[in-house]
Image: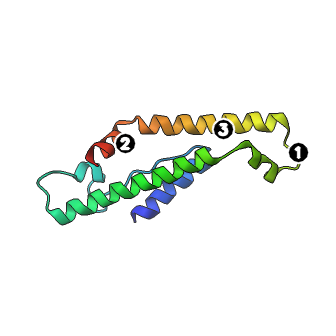
Amino acid sequence: FDTFVSNVQITQGHVEGTTCLPLPNAGNGKANVLDDVTPSEDDQDRFRQIHALEGALITWTKQIKNVLKRDPESLFELYTDPGPLAEIEFWKSKAGNLNSIFNQLQSARVRRVLKVL
């Protein structure tokens, strides 16, 4: 279920033209994994929660790498003669995407993920 929710969040970001870094949900009726991780829990449940957070971090890393790999030469694959305005749009889009990622990485929820890990 977490994978489905993550994919929906990623797709929603694509529709909006940004990169969405999905946060895992608990799946046990609680709000999210970040609310679940407490020292008093049994080892099995804590392991599952840490595993979900690690999976999210791996997904984020892949998403960020994909954004950084994009280059203006890819415009030539889409268009025969893209022109300078297409390249300007490319850089605006990439800058907006990187700013969106930066803002998400600065959020309190993402900082809690990093603190837990």
N-term-proximal mark, 1 vs 2:
1
* Residue placed under numbered mark 3 in the picture: 93
Q: Which mark is residue 81?
A: 1
Q: Nearer the viewer, mark 3 or mark 1?
A: 1
Asked if residue 40 lies left or right of residue 6, the reply is left
In contact (CB < 8 Å): disc 2 and disc 3 = no
Please rate how many residues cluster around mark 2, counting C-alpha atoms within 10 Å: few if below 14, some from 14 to 19, many from 20: some
Above or below residue 86? Residue 36 is: below
User: Above or below — where is 74 with respect to 89?
Assistant: below
Q: Residue at x 58, y 50 (%)?
A: 66
Q: For mark 2, give the secondary structure.
A: helix
Upstream in sequence: badge 2 or badge 3: 3
- Which quadrant of the figure contains the N terminus? bottom left
Amino acid bearing label 2: Val
Kindly identify the residue that appears in the image at 81 percent across and 34 percent down: 85
| Image quadrant in which you'd find residue 49 | bottom left
- The residue that mark 2 highlights is 110
Mark 3, other Cα within 10 Å: few <14 / some 14–19 / many ≥20? some
Left or right? Give the position of 84 relative to 15: right
Percent across and percent down for residue 45 are: 21, 63
Q: Dot 3 lies on which element?
A: helix
